[in-house]
Image (cartoon, helix red, strand yellow):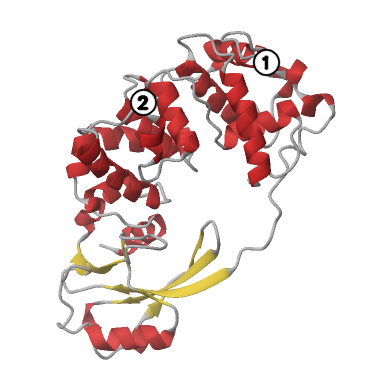
């Protein structure tokens, strides 16, 4: 492949398309600072642009730079993130900001290895930050880019396999040398926009594609086959009970989840895997009356590695003993306090329906 800057048809055609059809008014582009680029890249992992935009704007309004993020309590960060899902991203963002204050004078480093050393930043995210915020000639390889490269170059095999991913990195790096000087930020955005809006997973707009004459998948009638899907296996099912307790003031009892695992460090309803454990917890914290709980509609929620079905049980103040007291991991919360806490989206939705 051509390693002379500006000499690659792939990059040339993508940039020509981007100039006309790309996204130029995203909030993290104006201004395009390292912090704003970093935050947007973390938010955009597993999440669509239209969902991210209002979260991004609210987040930077509250925490406008790295030092502000580092100084914020984790609860505040999780509250701003609440609803975006994949909360490890927010915890890593907060931890990385603290390290930037300690190691880099409160700024995001412009060095590849220094970026990789921060929690939550992998090779592609580091490349996106360096190319967009610093103009460096560094490739990215997110899901959209993998799909485009697999189709254009006819790459077979699931892109998550190490050998296939290594091959795609080689291709992505070669194309970077074809980007004209001063246009790396646009090229990086062009790749993401192109995969998200034109070369989509289903029903790609091949007849509008600026790369159609070079696309091996289109030439061979294999657009729907590539990239090769991940070998499938059914997700395991898990079930648990969620205890919804109200006090006489109309507040609900929330419990902080453990610092690791699903919904780590968020506030949620007390949760137990079965009635025996739930009854034991209820007896120790509330007293008698476990069997008077009202069963509400189950909540189904999918995670990456399994599907969870939560069965909420609800008790009103009549059965609650006074022994339930606030502590660091258990607290009564009124409806108007919900927005100040990081709460899993399905639990927040339930509370909004059940709280007065």
The numbered mark at residue 28 is: 2
Tell me where residue 328 appears, x and y as whole percent. Answer: 18, 67
Residue extending farthest right: 220
Tell me where residue 30 appears, x and y as whole percent. Answer: 33, 19
**Residue at figure coordinates x 83%, y 24% from the top left:** 219
Q: Is residue 317 above or below residue 67?
A: below
Question: Quick one: label 1, few (<14), some, or many (20+) residues within 10 Å?
Answer: some
Q: Is residue 38 above or below residue 33?
A: below
Label 2 to label 1: alpha-carbon separation: 26 Å
Secondary structure of residue under mark 2: helix
The numbered mark at residue 210 is: 1
**First-in-chain label (2 vs 1):** 2
Quadrant in which the C terminus appears? bottom left
Residue sitting nearer the eye, 109 or 147: 109
Residue extending farthest bottom: 288
**Residue at figure coordinates x 45%, y 74% from the top left:** 240
Quadrant in which the N terminus appears? top right
Question: Quick one: label 2, few (<14), some, or many (20+) residues within 10 Å?
Answer: many
Is 189 left, or right, of 43 in this rendering?
Answer: right
The numbered mark at residue 346 is: none
Secondary structure of residue under mark 1: loop
**Residue at figure coordinates x 60%, y 32% from the top left:** 169
Residue 200 seen in the current view: no
């Amino acid at each position: 492949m051509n390693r002379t800057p500006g000499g690659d048809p792939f990059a040339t055609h993508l940039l020509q398309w981007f100039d006309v059809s790309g996204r130029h008014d995203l909030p993290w582009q104006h201004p395009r600072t390292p912090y704003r680029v970093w935050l947007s890249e973390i938010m955009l992992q597993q999440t669509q642009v239209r969902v991210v935009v209002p979260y991004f704007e609210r987040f930077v309004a509250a925490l406008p730079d790295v030092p502000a993020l580092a100084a914020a309590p984790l609860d505040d960060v999780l509250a701003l993130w609440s609803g975006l899902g994949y909360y490890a991203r927010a915890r890593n963002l907060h931890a990385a900001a603290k390290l930037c204050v300690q190691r880099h004078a409160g700024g995001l480093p412009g060095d590849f290895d220094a970026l990789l050393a921060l929690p939550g930043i992998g090779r592609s995210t580091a490349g996106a930050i360096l190319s967009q915020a610093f103009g460096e000639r560094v490739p990215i390889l997110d899901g959209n880019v993998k799909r485009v490269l697999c189709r254009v170059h006819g790459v077979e095999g699931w892109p998550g396999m190490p050998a296939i991913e290594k091959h795609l990195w080689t291709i992505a790096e070669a194309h970077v040398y074809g980007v004209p000087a001063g246009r790396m930020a646009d090229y990086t955005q062009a790749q993401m926009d192109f995969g998200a809006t034109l070369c989509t997973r289903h029903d790609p707009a091949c007849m509008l594609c600026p790369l159609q004459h070079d696309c091996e998948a289109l030439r061979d009638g294999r657009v729907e086959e590539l990239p090769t899907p991940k070998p499938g296996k059914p997700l395991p099912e898990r079930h648990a009970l969620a205890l919804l307790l109200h006090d006489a003031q109309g507040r609900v009892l929330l419990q902080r989840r453990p610092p690791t695992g699903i919904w780590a460090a968020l506030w949620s309803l007390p949760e137990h895997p079965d009635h025996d454990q739930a009854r034991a917890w209820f007896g120790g914290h509330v007293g008698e009356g476990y069997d008077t709980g009202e069963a509400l509609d189950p909540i189904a929620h999918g995670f990456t590695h399994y599907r969870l079905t939560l069965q909420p049980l609800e008790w009103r103040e009549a059965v609650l003993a006074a022994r339930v007291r606030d502590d660091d991991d258990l607290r009564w919360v009124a409806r108007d306090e919900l927005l100040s806490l990081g709460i899993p989206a399905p639990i927040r939705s339930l509370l909004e329906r059940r709280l007065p």
